[in-house]
Image (cartoon, helix red, strand yellow):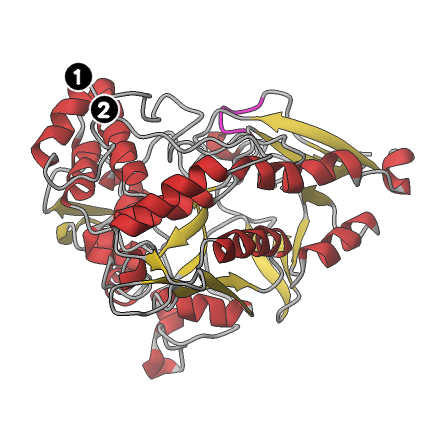
Amino acid sequence: MTIDDVLWSFETLGTQGHPRYRNIWAKIATMAQTGPRSVRFTFTEPDRELPLLLGLRPILQRAQFDTERGGRVFDQSSMEPVIGSGPYVVASVEVGRSITFQRNPDWWAADLPFYRGQHNLDEIRYEYYGDASVAFEAFKAGLVSVWREPNAARWFDSYDFPAIADGRIAQTEIPHQRPSGMSGFVFNTRRSLFADWRVREAFIQVFDFAQINATVNGGAEPRIVSYFGNSQLGMQPGPANGRVLGLLTPFADTLPPGAIDGYALPQSNGRSNRRNRRAATRLLNDAGWVADERGVLRNPQGEAFVFEILLRQGSAEHQAIANAYVETLLQMGIEARLTIIDAAQYVERTNEFDFDMTYLRRSMSLSPGNEQTLYWGSDGVGQPGSRNWAGVGSAAVDAMIETMVEAQDHEGFTAAVRALDRALMAGRYVVPFWYTPASRLAISQGLHFPDNLPIYGDWTGFLPEVWWYQE
């Protein structure tokens, strides 16, 4: 690795790479070599997270992309492995089926104190399946070593196969204290149908969470009530106060109802959702959508409320939720069409924001920062490939993210995140589902992990980094 590799990698990723790299590159004023093995970065603005983010950037080998000497073209797809500096090398690839990594016995960092005890497995193979049910059957047959179970109901009623009974596979739950994040059906607010917060609130009202949670999870999972729920960063119930109120007050005229005075999701009992449906009808009427003599919801121009829910092939659980939602919306006079496409088409359409509604999952850490700009920043509204699927274009949201990354103390940081949480929840950008406060893992005999678990539980840096095999 050379200084030239470092400088070239940062500039190339920043100008030709994914938007997540470009956003950080835009905050670098200058980049220069200062010694035989040192580089100095000067930033365009205060951002206490930037040094960490730069340290996490991959460094590529420039020579591999030297097209004048037969190297690969950087911005063209290829199955040629990128030369990296990690503990594993790519041993083999079956396109669309699997990738096998082999441990490098001469890895340069193997004896550094930070990595001592990590990267213990000689071979790691990732298997890819187009359908979760097929993948689960492969796990039951012993073709997959570790299975992370996302469905609470299946965890309790589907693990009665022989490998569990004879001890070849063991079930374990790993609790965590990380934020709930956001998971649910996201509105594309670029579409005129969902530009009005009242319409989005109506859709949230008619989503019968209690009934769907009981059907899918046996009622076991708690609902997501904020983007940073299950942590101290989550917004507090009731009206904003203190530093949170001070941050939001300058934007009071542009924030949606509930951001300052308090917002909470509607409640249902799983038996009847009539009260919420009546509230939804009033909101839709206020937004100009009124049912005709046949019960079809129409706007003042006479256009029926018709939209598409776009899902990726193989997402059986999300399809089941969508089917139930479609039936409910139909009773409201709204026609929702469910479209299932393959992974490649899905990536293409979401990159271009070519959808009305789709499934969104955004994981959050206890140290949120610049990635929030990628998720919700105004610059991403019209930037293809950004992760701002909802089309959030809010001066308040932008300001809360900026305040968060510039925070000088824990209290100021927490207040900024809670204020951001309020602005996002009150924006009604997502119909929230549920989260799991513990990871459920089914593990093949012989695989082990440390007893001392991190606050994040089973997350990045845990599996497979610190696992080992022992009979």
Residue 463: x %, y % from top left: 59, 39
At 29% from the left and 66% from the top, the residue drawn is 384
Left/right placement of residue 327 relative to residue 364 reads: right
Q: For the view shown, which residue lies furthest in the front direction?
A: 293
Q: Quadrant of residue 231?
A: top left
At 25% from the left and 60% from the top, the residue drawn is 14
User: Can see residue 429?
Assistant: no
Disc 1 crowd rating (10 Å Cα; few below 14, some 14-19, many 20+) is few
Q: Magenta stretch?
A: 453-457
The residue tagged 2 is 415
Disc 2 crowd rating (10 Å Cα; few below 14, some 14-19, many 20+) is many
Residue 3: x %, y % from top left: 27, 55
Q: For the view shown, which residue lies furthest in the left direction?
A: 250
Disc 2 vs disc 1: which is toward the camera? 1
Task: Point out which mark residue 110 bears.
Answer: none
The residue tagged 1 is 242
At 41% from the left and 63% from the top, the residue drawn is 293
Whether residues under marks 2 and 1 lie with C-beta atoms below 8 angstroms apart, the answer is yes
Q: Amino acid at mark 2?
A: Ala
Q: Nearer the viewer, residue 248 or 197?
A: 197
Left/right placement of residue 98 relative to residue 273 reads: right
- Does dot 1 land on a helix, a strand or a loop? helix
Q: Nearer the viewer, residue 203 or 93?
A: 203
- Does dot 2 land on a helix, a strand or a loop? helix
